[in-house]
Image (cartoon, rainbow, N blue to C red):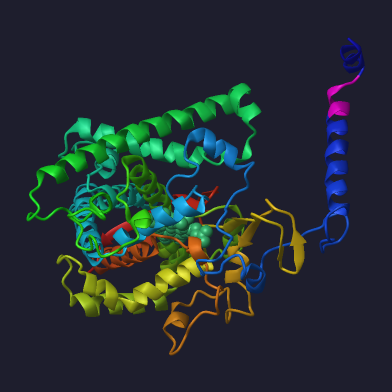
Amino acid sequence: MIFSKLFENIDYLSLIGIALIIYVTNYYYKYFTRINPLPGPFPYPFFALNRIEQSEKLLLSSSRNPFIKKHSTKDGKGFHELGILGKGLLFNQELKSWKYNRHFFTQAILSPKFANEAVHLINIIFNELEGYWDKLYLKEGNNKNKMDISTWFNQFTNDMIFVILTGERSYTMAGYFNEISENEKAERPSALIDETVKFVRAIRNLFKGILMFQFVSPFLRHYFPYFKNKSDEVIQSLDFINQRMDSIIKRRRQEIENTPLDKPLSNDLLTTIIIADTPRDLSYNKNDDKEVMRPMTDLEIRGIIFDGIIAGTDTVNIFFSISLLKFFVLNIIFNGFIYYLKQTANTISYIIYYLANNPDVKKKMLNEIDRIFQGDKTRPITESDINNLKYCEAIVKEVSRIFSVVNSLPRCLEKSDEIGGYQWPPETIFRINIDAIHHNKEYWDEPDKFNPDRWLAEDFEPKKNSFIAFGRGLRICAGRKLAMVELVGLIALLFRKYEIDLVNKEAPLKTYSEAVTACTELLVEIKLRN
Ligand code: HEM
């Protein structure tokens, strides 16, 4: 009664004012009662993890590094609600279970058979992509040679990561072809296309909405219509993904059981993980630690394959977009680029972007590609080609240095600790600023210059922890080798045969930034190289 009377006389503006005063008072109360003061002028105490010595402790590679937590217990509640906390790798901060999952993931992804299979699959998926491009843009007399290459890379990386990780095909390139082709349709059953397009859409929904479960309070998510609808969509997407993954895993187990022991199995990640530490595994019985090496359950397998798909799809696609973009436009729109850095961006498109405005780099890259392939524009690329494409590898590294797809590395303190010369309470979250470290003059000569050659200089080794595009320490990207193989392979396959140029070098870049910085559109002109 008293409360309702009180609120009758207060307008909304005053309520906002009161809320603000409470917030600021609480903020400064916490600031002045903290263990030690932070730098930065009053009223903005500010501590930035911009230097390698500040983050060294958090990024130790030793297995005794206690900093494997990436989000606070409070933030983790939303992930718990989704049922992903403590599973797989990305959202797992229970040391024992994370180590166990990481062991299986790493063992499978680093096996020589897997690398070979990945290269084989890149050839197959790229051939399919070329088939669609031939029909749409490269027919003789066809003047429609402009395309949004970023959307194609999106579909390409979806199909590639999916088959590499699960051994099953997805057909999102076919779906996109059907969407934009006026006359022809892809030679794939439409039910299969629809099913995989739906699956990939669910992954994207989940990827986009997952941060809401970290940063938006449960109250808003459960009762505020806008947030409730969004979070219901995320939950539905996750249920759909889980059902599909479960049926893939069951089917594969069945196939493995039905295959005689002396017959080979496929080398995708899923099969390798299912058979790990079973009589089908070549290293069976070599390890006595039965706790670490017991075979994985379906739920555990689902957790790590799911993470591979989530972590591997957008990053690679983005990386390529970013790289392409960087090649093309960096010098022209440097200011735009800075804006772009702050706002948003994507990796494989960024490679293209850079090449266009760095003709010397492009020329060197083409020389290397032509030397390796000797003018053969159709033979499959091999693992040995990829190992020999050192300049292309340097391009990938330089693009990821100058324009990191992932913006920061989070780490959360389990116990009170000293970081960067200050004492911090438990549950403090740090975000290591990747861009600041990659652009620091103390660690890099001319850090703003796009210079792949720096990686090839004799005895060059980046200063410890100064190159962190794939993270560092115990939680370093588990798929970085695969990412490298994919990106170098894709650059070579693309540029040995096609000439690609931006339609409009001065057009502003279309990007968005969330957990990663992504390119939403990259219009290019494509034609066959002479
Ligand atoms: C250009 C491509 C990629 C980039 C830039 C990238 C970058 C990253 C970064 C920055 C992290 C966090 C590392 C840390 O906190 O220290 C990470 C984690 C991870 N990445 Fe990647 N990644 C890429 C591709 C891939 C691919 C292709 C896969 C798998 C197929 C993958 C799987 C993972 C997994 C599973 C984790 C979690 C590791 C853990 O927490 O133990 N990534 N990645």
- Quarter holding residue 171: top left
Determine whether, in the image, residue 13 is placed left or right of residue 418: right
- Taking the spot 47% from the left edge, 53% from the top edge, the residue there is 96
Residue 107 on image: x %, y %: 32, 61
Q: Quadrant of the N terminus?
A: top right
Determine whether, in the image, residue 47 is placed left or right of residue 3: left
Chief secondary structure of the magenta span? helix
Q: Residue most toward the top?
A: 1
Determine whether, in the image, residue 100 is placed left or right of residue 495: right
Identify whether 451 is placed above or below 270.
below
Identify whether 247 is placed above or below 67.
above
Examine the rendering and report whether any part of residue 202 can be seen: yes
Identify whether 477 is placed above or below 442.
above
Q: Residue most toward the bottom?
A: 458
Depth check: 239 or 194 in front? Answer: 239
- Taking the spot 20% from the left edge, 51% from the top edge, the residue there is 128
Which quarter of the frame holds ligand 1?
A: bottom left
Residue 448 on image: x %, y %: 58, 73
Q: Quadrant of the C terminus?
A: bottom left
Residue 191 on image: x %, y %: 21, 30
Write down the region rendered in magenta: 10-15
Does the magenta portion include 13? yes
Examine the rendering and report whether any part of residue 318 can be seen: no
Does the magenta portion include 100? no
